[in-house]
Image (cartoon, grey):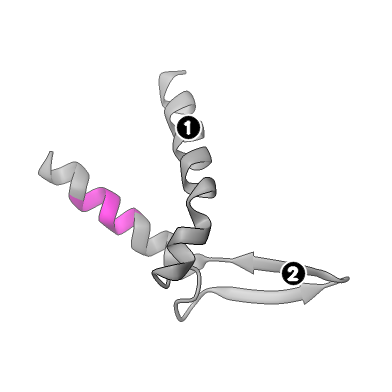
Amino acid sequence: MRWIVVIFVLLLVLLTCIPTLRKWGLGRLPGDIHFRLLGKEIEIPLMSTIFLAAIAMVVGKLL
């Protein structure tokens, strides 16, 4: 149960940091998918997610 709370809190923090992350280029990497469907813009940040997961894994291994 504790891991679910930790993941939820991390997702909330990440979602609030999205404008700052966009300035650094995350969300616009090759492999990130952007399209418009029925008037709504849909973004699927595949490469950005893989990149952030790799950074988290390296940090986790170091600690």
Residue 30, numbered label: none
Residue 41, numbered label: 2
Q: On the rendered structure, is 18 left or right of 55? A: right
Based on the picture, tell me whether residue 57 belongs to the magenta stretch: yes
Q: Residue 57's x, y, as percent?
A: 25, 49
Residue lying at 42% horizontally and 28% vertically, measured from the top left: 6
Which residue is most to the bottom? 30
Q: Is residue 36 visible?
A: yes
Segment tinted magenta in the rendering: 53-58
Q: On the rendered structure, is 35 left or right of 59? A: right
Q: Residue 36's x, y, as percent?
A: 77, 75
For disc 1, the neighbor class at 10 Å (few under 14, some 14 to 19, many from 20) is: few
The residue where tag 1 is placed is 9
In this view, the residue in front, 12 or 47, is 12
What amino acid is at disc 2? Glu
Instruction: State yes or no: discs 1 and 2 in contact (Cβ < 8 Å).
Output: no
Q: Secondary structure at mark 2?
A: strand
Q: Secondary structure at mark 1?
A: helix
Which residue is most to the left? 62
Q: CA distance from mark 1 to mark 2?
A: 25 Å
Q: On the rendered structure, is 30 left or right of 34? A: left
In this view, the residue in front, 1 or 9, is 9
- Main secondary structure of the magenta stretch: helix
